[in-house]
Amino acid sequence: MRPRDDQRSGRGLDRADAADAIAEGVRGVGPGEIPARLCDVAVELLPVTGASVSLQSDGMPVQLGASSAQAAYVTEIQATLGDGPCQSAAESGTPVLACDLTTGRDAQRWPVFAQQATAAGVRAVYSMPLGNDTVCVGTLDLYRDTPGDLNSRELHMARLMAGMMTVALMALPHAEEAGEPGDERWLSGLAADHDHVYQATGMIMAQLGVATDEALARLRAHAFAHGRTALDVAHDVVAHRLRLDQD
């Protein structure tokens, strides 16, 4: 039997609150909506103004969902630059807390990302790895419009959210599993846009005669130089509206 509210406290209460909020947040929605709903739950439970969730694929974050257009955009900035708290958390497998992107150590660690994130209205980023002690499969990225740290309870809740989000995402049906007609598979459907990045990378490899890493770097450099996201540039390359060998 579940303990009464007045019998639960501290970390037990955090876990129960998170589980209840997640269950309520995803009730009645299809697989394709779950990542964004989980981001909404994170914003409800934590002192943040936005959240996004991404899986890592070949060193690039593939965004599955976000709580707002701002959160989605800042995640795409990190994908375009190949740099930022999200990338650092994915590489290290540990939480990365950028508590003040306006000045000091955090602004110096990711100077270009910090400038672009603050221009978009984000002043702090907390990136939580998804996965386990040995494998990081992605990140839960939390955004705030004012500088500041997470206290110990808030950090614990953020870790709990990341752990529960990992379980929830991995439990969703995959592309090869049968489903109802018209039911979009969660990963193949949500990450479809990022297929354009890989397709565009292959086209750039052929155009420039370079390896995969160099082709992706060229795509990112073009996007950064023109104030666009890597995903936007990839769409143009795939649609034959842009050739990087003509830059």
Image (tube, rainbow, N blue to C red):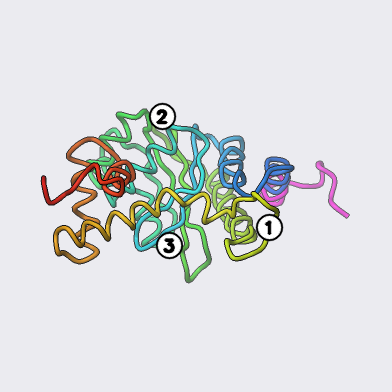
Name the residue at 60% across, 51% down: 184
Q: Position of residue 108 (x, y in %)?
A: 22, 43
The residues tagged by marks 3 and 1 sit, at their Cα atoms, a distance apart of: 33 Å
Q: Residue 93 shows which numbered tag?
A: 3
Which residue type carries mark 1? Gly
Of the residues under marks 3 and 1, which one precedes in the sequence?
Answer: 3
The number of numbered discs placed on residues in the rendered structure image is: 3
Circle 1 packing at 10 Å, graded few (<14), some (14-19), many (20+), is few
- Per the image, the residue denoted by label 1 is 179
Asked which secondary structure carries label 2, the reply is loop
Label disc, if present, on residue 222 of the rendered structure: none
Residue occupying the point 34% across, 45% down: 231
Q: Residue at x 88, y 55 (%)?
A: 1
Region of the chain picked out in magenta, as a range: 1-17
Other residues around mark 2 within 10 Å, as few (<14) / some (14–19) / many (≥20): some
Horizontal relation, residue 103 to residue 125: left or right: left
The amino acid sitting under disc 3 is Gly
Q: Quadrant of residue 70?
A: top left
Q: Is residue 184 above or below residue 113?
A: below
Label 3 to label 2: alpha-carbon separation? 25 Å
Q: Secondary structure at mark 3?
A: loop
Give the number of the mark in front: 2 or 1. 1
Q: Which residue is mark 2?
A: 146
- Looking at the image, is 209 positioned above or below residue 15? below
Separation of disc 2 and disc 1 at Cα?
43 Å
User: Which circle's residue, 2 or 1, is located before the other in the chain?
Assistant: 2
Which amino acid lies under the numbered mark 2 shown in the image of this protein?
Thr
